[in-house]
Amino acid sequence: MKSSAAAALAVLGAAGSGCATIIEGTTQSVSVNTDPVQRAQCTLNNSQGTWYITSPGSVVVHKTKTDLTVTCSKEGYVTKRIVATSHFKGTTAGNVVFGVVGAPVGAGVDAASGANFYYESPLIVPLTERAAAGGQSSPFPISMHCSRPSTNADILPDGPEGYVTAIMRFDVNSADHAGAVQVTPAQDGFCTVDAPDGIVVRSASVVIDGASSWNAGEIAKHVDVVESVPDSEHPGTHYAFTVKAKDAGKGSVLLKFPISYR
């Protein structure tokens, strides 16, 4: 009798020692495919974190009772977002450990840690080509429209609701990328951040991505990126950015615009 009680206490001690789960794991590998398009950039997000992959690919995510949002984008294609439902797996007989007073321990720990939940895998995120002039529609209440040629920036989630990042490439004295904004000393690239009625843009800034032709120091020699005052042709604009070529240097600049709204 004493040995049984000791064993039960040992189990309870293990359950309370910081272990995240009794039987089920708290993580899961999720595969994402954007077939027939490949090498799309995908962001996976739930209440436990954010993960990034290039399609087709897999990533280990933390399981939770909240759904998993998957957003994939690729230059020349419409950004697509899907929501993977969090499914409750239930408790199996082997997943229940009883304490000294007969209380089920494993089920409670697994449920609290998210281990009893799972996502379907693989996940399919279909991408379609973006119309040449129409641009893409954003799944968020924020958009960034750029001119020359007329197109919309890709909008990706960047944290909890109310935080996104707009991504746009600017070809400087070249035309190497389909859909990129064309910039020359005689022609600036102009982009505006817009929101529908009832949504307020709280802030917008710009970050130079490492995929640009030049590093941050060299870009300053060839390109100016400035926040500009919206003109009468863009009513309702909260923020606007202009990219100016300073010389005949040829290259491309990938810019990210972190935006917060409410």
Image: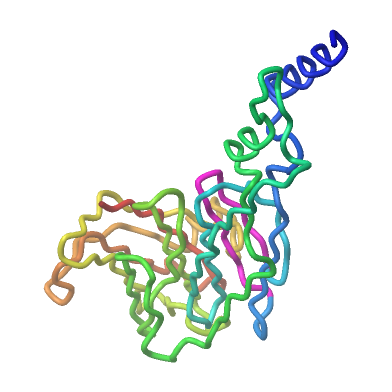
Vertical side of 159 occupied by 157: above or below: below
How far from the left and from the top, in percent, is residue 248? 50, 74
| Relative depth, front residue between 69 and 255 | 69
Magenta-span inclusion, residue 184:
no
Q: Residue furthest bottom?
A: 132
Q: Is residue 128 left or right of residue 259?
A: right
Q: Residue at x 55, y 57 (%)?
A: 86
User: Taken as a whole, is the magenta stretch helix, strand or loop?
Assistant: strand
Q: Which residues are magenta?
A: 39-54
Q: Residue at x 36, y 73 (%)?
A: 189
Q: Is residue 61 left or right of residue 76?
A: right
Image quarter of the N terminus:
top right
Indicate the quadrant where residue 245 lies: bottom left
User: Could you tell whether 33 is left or right of 8 in the image?
Assistant: left
Q: Is residue 190 above or below residue 162?
A: below
What residue is drawn where x is 44% and y is 80%?
182
Question: Please, which colouring scheme is shown?
Answer: rainbow
The image quarter containing residue 102 is top right
Q: Residue furthest top?
A: 2
The image shows a total of numbered marks equal to 0
Q: Position of residue 119 (x, y in %)?
A: 62, 59
Residue 94 in the image, given as x and y percentages of width and height: 78, 42
Q: Residue furthest front?
A: 1
Q: Position of residue 236 (x, y in %)?
A: 15, 67
